[in-house]
Amino acid sequence: MKRFFYYFAWSIAIALIAYAGLELQQVLDEKAAAEFEPRPLWVYVVIFPIIIGLLLRTPKFMLERKESRIGGFDWSKFFAISIPAFIVIVLSILPLMPIENIPYPDFYEPFNLILFDGTTAQTIAGLVFGYTLLDSFKSEERRFQESTSDLFNAVMKFTPKG
């Protein structure tokens, strides 16, 4: 029952933070329309989902940390999942940066409409980046599962067939 209340409290906290964040986004949207300055809004649209992604993984991360089960960092997961999401995030705010004569990559033009047509790409990439960032910390249990599956695969490789 204690675990239920722990997760329930985190759910309420995340919902309240999401509500406050959406209210702030509405204020920034109105300010951007009034002042014709979209940069603060787009930076917020990119950063807020990262925070929500971090918050979604935080309850389990805190339990693993409390139980001292964190035992390393899964670089392959981080590079395979987080870096592409981060690239989408950077490409979406790159045109809004106050840097003159940015040499855009050749592949950028087809993605330009996808990234700026709405906020869906930034939201998904931000959630994935934030969640995977905390999920990349290995727990002792996960490391044990990976080592036993590696052992099983090695045994099966050398087992005669037939």
Image (cartoon, rainbow, N blue to C red):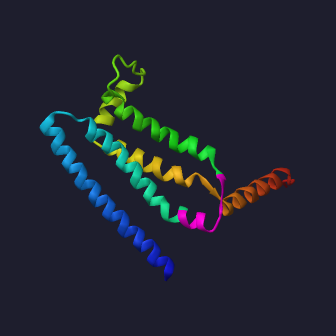
Count of picture labels: 0
The spot of residue 25 in percent (x, y) is: 24, 49
The spot of residue 21 in percent (x, y) is: 29, 54
Question: Outermost residue toward the left?
Answer: 34
Question: Outermost residue toward the bottom?
Answer: 1
Horizontal side, residue 77 vs residue 145: left or right: left
Horizontal side, residue 135 vs residue 127: left or right: right
In the image, what residue occupies the spot 37% across and 19% down?
102
Give the quarter of the image for residue 139: bottom right
The spot of residue 94 in percent (x, y) is: 36, 29
In the image, what residue occupies the spot 31% across and 44% down?
45
The spot of residue 89 in percent (x, y) is: 40, 38
Quarter holding the C terminus is bottom right
Where is 2 relative to 12, above or below? Answer: below
In the image, what residue occupies the spot 41% across and 49% down?
50
Horizontal side, residue 133 vs residue 125: left or right: right
Residue situated in front as seen by the camera: 154 or 144: 144
Q: Which residues are magenta?
A: 62-72
Give the quarter of the image for residue 114: top left
Can residue 117 be seen by looking at this rendering? no
Was residue 69 drawn as part of the magenta stretch in this picture? yes
Was residue 105 drawn as part of the magenta stretch in this picture? no
Give the quarter of the image for residue 69: bottom right
In the image, what residue occupies the spot 23% across and 35% down?
38
Can residue 93 be seen by looking at this rendering? yes
Where is 121 relative to 17, above or below? Answer: above
